[in-house]
Amino acid sequence: MAFPNDDENYPAVGSFPREFGYSSGGEYDVNGAGTLVSEEKPRILLMGLQGSGKSSIQKVVFHKMSPNETLFLENTTKIVKDDVSNSSFVQFQIWDFPGQIDFLDPSFDSETIFGGCGALIFVIDAQDEYSVALDKLLVTLSKAYAVNSNIRFEVFIHKVDGLSEDNKIETQGEIHQKTNQDLMHSKLDNINVCFYLTSIYDHSIFEAFSKVVQKLIPQLPTLENLLNIFISNSGIDKAFLFDVVSKIYIATDSSAVDMQSYELCCDMIDVVIDVSCIYGCKDETENGAFDEQSSSIIKLNNNTVLYLREVNKFLALVCIMREDSFEKQGIIDYNFHVFRQAIQEVFNIHRKTLESSEEEKSPGGINMRSSLTNDAIRKSSNIV
Ligand SMILES: Nc1nc2c(ncn2[C@@H]2O[C@H](COP(=O)(O)OP(=O)(O)OP(=O)(O)O)[C@@H](O)[C@H]2O)c(=O)[nH]1
């Protein structure tokens, strides 16, 4: 058993200890020339006006910074690149752009920046006057779309903690409508933009990021399928497959997500990690607080049980069920074992696909990938 022995080791209230996070990347020139060429991981770009909250989002979601600490963040003056290589499924980089970026600047290499981009998140400060932000959004969308029409465009209507419920809906409606009008006038109405109401002061930012990341996971339908089979055969009401470090869920079953369930599951991960950090054995591995023995049962006083199981080094399955369903824990555990094997299979395919990326380009490579994915589904039919 190990206890933290200096102030630095104590976690910020309500968040993981700092060492239980992602390594940070570095700063890059705005044009990115030379430094970006070798990068092959999918990229998520964070853009928006100065002070809209881009760096705060990145720090809170991926570096366990507590929301209050973001008050002291300095202006971003260069592209900050953050490598989020947390699991074989979710390997991407986040690039935080300075608010004052100028697309007309000849040093802005839009081919390189938008070329390998999976998603572009444009952050709008909902507490501020947003007409300038909407103009910038339009320029950004048209620039990026011209280079890469496969980018997924996401707009975070951010800092909504300062808005009343009615105001939130009204603001979202206005921004949505104005953006669509602008796109239509610019003959860009084939661009599909998704809108989210977010704040770093609650779970909405994690939920929105989950949805952005999920769209970049090609194996998502397979994962959802596996989760559906697992929960329907185990008497479970809802299950989330979590990336433990960031608390973004990379997949869930196909029943609707309600925010309260998601928050409960996030809180459970916090509790498990905090208790492990305080009372668990410290080992050399980076994420010593979460290992193959991590599992937890929390019984709530409304006949609900939360059940957490480790899936692999980076992923945890968190399930919500009624107390009487948990009486058959043996069946749930057996089904979970089969589910975990199937997930492993999907991971192996992913690795093999990466290894034979040359082969993947040929029709043979694609066939191998889909037939192995079907193998994982077949394996899950062993679930009782
Ligand atoms: N109320 C509220 N404030 C927020 C939220 N997110 C960020 N902020 C605050 O907004 C301010 C600016 O945040 P930054 O993350 O530095 O903004 P930025 O977009 O990275 O700014 P540049 O680096 O200049 O481009 C900080 O004081 C944050 O604390 C939020 O969800 N709600």
Image (tube, rainbow, N blue to C red):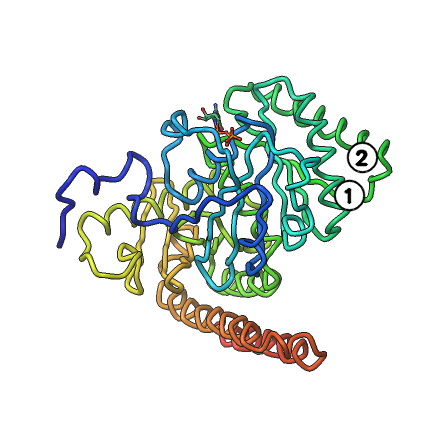
Kind of residue indicated by mark 2: Leu
- Asked if residue 380 is positioned above or below residue 84 in the image, the reply reads below
**Badge 1 element:** loop
- Image coordinates for residue 78, horizontal then vertical, percent: 51, 38
Q: Nearer the viewer, residue 142 or 203?
A: 142
Which residue occupies 77% across, 46% down? 146
Find out whether the residues at labels 1 and 2 contact each other: C-beta distance under 8 Å: yes
Q: Where residue 226 sits in the image (x, y, percent)?
A: 54, 65
Left-right relation of 285 to 263: left
Q: Secondary structure at mark 2?
A: helix
Residue denoted by label 2: 183
Amino acid carrying mark 1 in the image? Ile
Q: Position of residue 182 (x, y in %)?
A: 80, 30
Toward which corner of the image does residue 314 lie, by quadrant? bottom left
Residue sitting at x 31%, y 53%: 297
Residue sitting nearer the eye, 325 or 254: 254
**Residue name at image x 59 percent, y 54 percent:** 254
